[in-house]
Amino acid sequence: KQWYQRRVAITAGMIKVATFLVLLAVTSGCTIQVIDDDLQNSYNSLEERLDEVEKDLAWQALHAAAAAACRGSVASGGTGPWGNAVLAKEASNTCDNICGATDFNICDADISIQGMPGKATSYGQRLGHYYNYGCSAVGNSNVLFDEVQAEDDAILTGSNPWYFRFCCCRKA
């Protein structure tokens, strides 16, 4: 919601700037078309940046949810003297292998999660999905569940309506 409020505030600011520039153009004899083109280019650039921020925040929210799901998938909540790790799950590999190739070499879980957009409107409404495949099996190898291979905007466009998969890893 905060990004939306920022977007509204920025748009309102752009309208004020546009009004000022039109008044300036009229009083100084400049052509409005040049200012209008510059303003449009600035607005387009701002829109592109806001779209990137929106995607980044959506991915960050998914990653935070994955960390919470990993913590909840382990009876101990995660152990060891170091922070544990959430890694993207490669569709054709096991989490035992993925974790084993890093400093976080022990797999605790292979999770799949997806959250639905928007605010809940009822108590029986399905807000998300989750699954734990276990560390030693490839599990569902659908490439759409592989975040690394997904399009940057897949989290916003709904091209993956079910899951993204993650490995829950810790150091030995």
Image: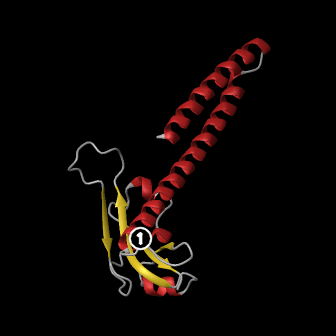
In the shown orientation, is residue 26 left or right of residue 83? right
Mark 1: give few (<14), some (14-19) or many (20+) Cα within 10 Å. many
Looking at the picture, does residue 30 appear above or below residue 147? above
Closer to us: 107 or 30: 107
Q: Residue furthest left?
A: 124
Q: Amino acid at mark 1?
A: Cys
Looking at the picture, does residue 155 appear above or below residue 168? above
Quadrant of res 34? top right
Q: Residue 94 placed where, x, y %?
A: 42, 84
Residue visible at 34% across and 81% down? 134
Quadrant of res 158? bottom left
Q: Residue furthest right?
A: 28
Q: Residue 95 placed where, x, y %?
A: 43, 82
Residue visible at 66% across and 31% down? 39
Indicate the secondary structure of the residue bearing disc 1.
Answer: helix
Q: Residue 139 placed where, x, y %?
A: 33, 81
Residue visible at 52% across and 41% down? 3
Q: How many numbered circles does the render carry? A: 1
- Is residue 100 in view from this perspective? yes
Closer to us: 11 or 136: 136
What colour-coding does the image apply? secondary structure
- Is residue 93 in view from this perspective? no
Q: Residue 105 placed where, x, y %?
A: 52, 85
In the shown orientation, is residue 49 left or right of residue 130? right
Q: Residue furthest top?
A: 27
In the shown orientation, is residue 71 left or right of residue 148? left
Closer to us: 95 or 169: 169
Closer to us: 89 or 63: 63
Q: Which residue is mark 1?
A: 70
